[in-house]
């Protein structure tokens, strides 16, 4: 049934326009039903080796175990899965890999070796005070492969973890530890490092407290006898990587990147509405006080309780995965306690470049672009990996039941990395360009419909995944709401308009005679007596509207959870009157595109000025 659904999705996509960002257009990584953490290393024989936590039931159910798969064609197809651990043993979960110089691959994962069936948890979340989901506890172990993942060592080896304060405060005082791992293990100055996320207990929101550590091995890169591999738990002391001062108790799924000067960057999720980060300048033994993530311009980034990973690419630049909204854990509303886990669709990427600071290298982060999406807004994409191969970039991700591989557009990535310097106006898709003396009206450009009748037997909807963008320079004498900047609506409301709105904002209105959609810029983004650049991007792939004003992608700020808004998939078009009415008193320059602009293009157009 699941294969049939995938085929139907692909067939439906083929009726309209194919968007590589739409996740159903990507090849699937096989699994048993549940699919989590599809992480990849390139083996020395040229294959991709992927490990997945899988099982025939849902996440956390019995039979959950770790498998591996090989691909010789960059994720287009996969060889038969190999069990790292069998499905009829204790739970084995949440694996990461490390390839050492010899070509040996190590896989590290949770193992419920003692077959614990229940643990003490918080009441009243757990009515009897017992949690019977047992996949995030027990022993942290590894196996290895010397044949590029075709088989794994029969014996597993345990990695000792030093007790931290969070362990001693759990109901078992550290005799039984709660933990898991995500992301990538890495090597640094001749040592191997494996991330680990310690957990304090189970209750409201599932994990009630968490912090990050690194397991460091000084000899794993060279030692052939796995029993002789040594381990230490970092940082020094008894407290791991936690949230910034005043933050919540959740600091988990730490993702690590090594910078060119040897500094280690770490980013992780919280329940505070923002991701957090820190740097280590001494190989992970100590960490700078954590801070919430910020763009290069100083604004805070927003992110819910979801995996948020950064990767250093082979070109020395960085990519960062997040969800660009401020989903928080709201304790005063227990019935909403899962809100912080929601809205992992779409996926946004940010580009990073190194910069100097008084303490060492740091990363400057660009503004965000939509990288992946699904038509179902409830779908949650997460636990990604980045793979570089042959000059191409690939992302893996999972919805917990289907994992996929996505090839990224290199121009998309270059746009992110060049965002700090690029200064240009794109001519691609430009259908109206007005400068000098702005007329009171102009012939409205043709904008393709968002959907049309398909060629299927039922003649149903073919989603064209089109879009359009408005790029204008304005000078408003007043920001009073209701002023029309652009308007091609007919007398019955069909078409689009850009108008000033309450709270010093500007609003886009779209109407096809059947449905009307509105979304506004963030409050305070429009100011009187100032020349401003406004880019309105209507992306018919994910059905999302974004505003980029004066080179700043609106993210909601403190005023709202989302700076971007969804429009109805049933909105057919913005075709309106034959003429587009334009405010001569306010509009100084106008460009209209029959496609969605990327954020990077909007930023570059702002930097180019009102030429």
Image: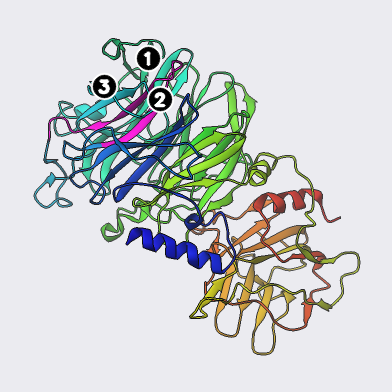
**Residue in front for this viewpoint, 504 or 382:** 382
Taking 509 as reference, is 592 above or below it? above
The disc at residue 161 is 3
Q: Nearer the viewer, mark 2 or mark 3?
A: 2
Secondary element under disc 3, as helix, strand or loop, is loop
Q: Is residue 53 left or right of residue 288?
A: left
List x then y, in percent, for residue 491: 68, 89
Q: CA distance from mark 2 to mark 1?
A: 10 Å
First to last magenta residue range: 93-115
Please tell me which residue is depicted at 30% across the width and 11% down the height of the picture.
Answer: 225
220 left or right, relative to 479:
left
Q: Dot 2 lies on which element?
A: strand
N-terminal of the two: label 2 or label 3?
2
Residue 48 % position (x, y): 46, 34
- What's the CA distance linking mark 1 and mark 3? 16 Å
- Which mark identifies residue 98? 2
For residue 70, side relative to residue 494 (left or right) = left
What is the number of the mark on residue 220?
1
Q: Position of residue 79 (x, y in %)?
A: 39, 39
Q: Secondary structure at mark 1?
A: loop
Residue nearer the viewer, 469 or 304:
469
Give the number of callouts.
Answer: 3
Q: Picture coordinates of residue 392 (x, y %)?
A: 60, 38
Q: Are marks 1 and 3 in contact (CB under 8 Å)?
A: no
* Earlier sequence position, callout 2 versus callout 1: 2
| Crowding near the residue tagged with mark 2, few <14, some 14–19, many ≥20 C-alpha atoms within 10 Å | many
Q: Is residue 441 left or right of residue 459?
A: right
Residue neighbourhood size for the residue with mark 1, other residues' Cα within 10 Å, grouped as few (<14), some (14–19), many (≥20)? many
Q: State the CA–CA distance, disc 2 to disc 3.
A: 18 Å
Instruction: Between residue 381 and residue 409, name the one nearer to us.
Output: 409
Outermost residue on the bottom side: it is: 491
């Amino acid at each position: 049934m699941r294969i049939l659904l995938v085929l139907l999705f692909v067939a439906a996509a083929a009726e309209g326009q194919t968007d590589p960002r739409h996740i159903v257009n990507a090849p699937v990584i096989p699994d048993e039903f549940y699919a989590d953490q599809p992480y990849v290393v390139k083996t020395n024989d040229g294959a991709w080796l992927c490990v997945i936590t899988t099982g025939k039931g849902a996440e956390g159910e019995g039979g959950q175990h770790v498998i591996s798969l090989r691909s010789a064609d960059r994720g287009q197809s996969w060889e038969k899965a190999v069990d790292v651990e069998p499905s009829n043993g204790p739970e084995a979960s949440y694996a990461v890999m490390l390839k050492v110089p010899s070509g040996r691959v190590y896989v590290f994962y949770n193992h419920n070796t003692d077959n614990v069936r229940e643990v003490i948890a918080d009441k009243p979340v757990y009515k009897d005070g017992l949690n019977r989901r047992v996949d995030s506890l027990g022993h942290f172990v590894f196996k290895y492969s010397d044949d590029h993942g075709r088989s794994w060592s029969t014996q597993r080896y345990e990695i000792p973890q030093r007790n931290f304060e969070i362990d001693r405060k759990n109901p078992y005082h550290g005799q039984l530890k709660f933990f898991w791992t995500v992301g990538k293990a890495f090597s640094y100055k001749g040592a191997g490092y494996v991330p680990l996320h310690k957990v304090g207990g189970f209750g409201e929101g599932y994990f009630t407290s968490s912090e990050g550590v690194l397991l460091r091995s000084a000899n794993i890169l060279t030692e052939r006898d796995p029993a002789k591999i040594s381990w230490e738990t970092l940082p020094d002391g008894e407290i791991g990587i936690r949230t910034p001062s005043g933050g919540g108790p959740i600091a988990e799924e730490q993702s690590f990147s090594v910078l060119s000067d040897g500094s280690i960057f770490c980013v992780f999720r919280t329940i505070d509405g923002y991701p957090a980060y820190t740097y280590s300048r001494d190989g992970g033994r100590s960490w700078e006080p954590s801070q919430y993530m910020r763009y290069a311009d100083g604004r805070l980034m927003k992110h819910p309780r979801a995996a948020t990973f950064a990767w250093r690419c082979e070109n020395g630049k960085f990519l960062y995965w997040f969800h660009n909204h401020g989903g928080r854990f709201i304790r005063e509303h227990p019935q909403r306690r899962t809100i912080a886990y929601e809205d992992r669709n779409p996926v946004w990427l940010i580009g990073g470049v190194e910069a100097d600071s008084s303490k060492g290298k740091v990363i400057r982060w660009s503004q965000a672009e939509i990288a992946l999406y699904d038509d179902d807004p409830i779908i949650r994409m997460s636990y990604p990996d980045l793979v570089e191969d042959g000059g191409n970039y690939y992302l893996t991700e999972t919805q917990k039941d289907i994992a996929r591989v996505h090839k990224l557009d290199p121009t998309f990535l270059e746009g992110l990395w060049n965002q700090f310097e690029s200064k240009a106006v794109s001519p691609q898709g430009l259908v109206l360009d007005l400068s000098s003396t702005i007329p009171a009206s102009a012939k409205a450009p043709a904008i393709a419909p968002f959907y049309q009748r398909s060629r299927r037997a039922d003649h149903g909807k073919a989603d064209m995944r089109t879009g359009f963008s408005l790029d204008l320079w304005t000078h408003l004498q007043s920001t009073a709401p209701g002023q029309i900047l652009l308007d091609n609506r007919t007398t019955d409301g069909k078409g689009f308009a850009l108008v000033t709105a309450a709270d010093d904002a500007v609003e886009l209105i779209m109407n096809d005679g059947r449905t009307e959609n509105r979304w506004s810029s963030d409050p305070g983004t429009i100011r009187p007596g100032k020349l401003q650049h406004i880019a309105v991007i209507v992306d018919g792939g994910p059905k999302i509207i974004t505003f980029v004003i004066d080179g700043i992608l609106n993210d909601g700020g403190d005023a709202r959870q989302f700076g971007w808004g969804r429009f109805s998939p049933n909105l057919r078009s913005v075709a309106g009157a034959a003429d587009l009415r334009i405010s001569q008193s306010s509009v100084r320059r106008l460009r209209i595109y029959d496609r969605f602009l990327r954020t990077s293009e909007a930023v570059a157009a702002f930097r180019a000025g009102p030429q």
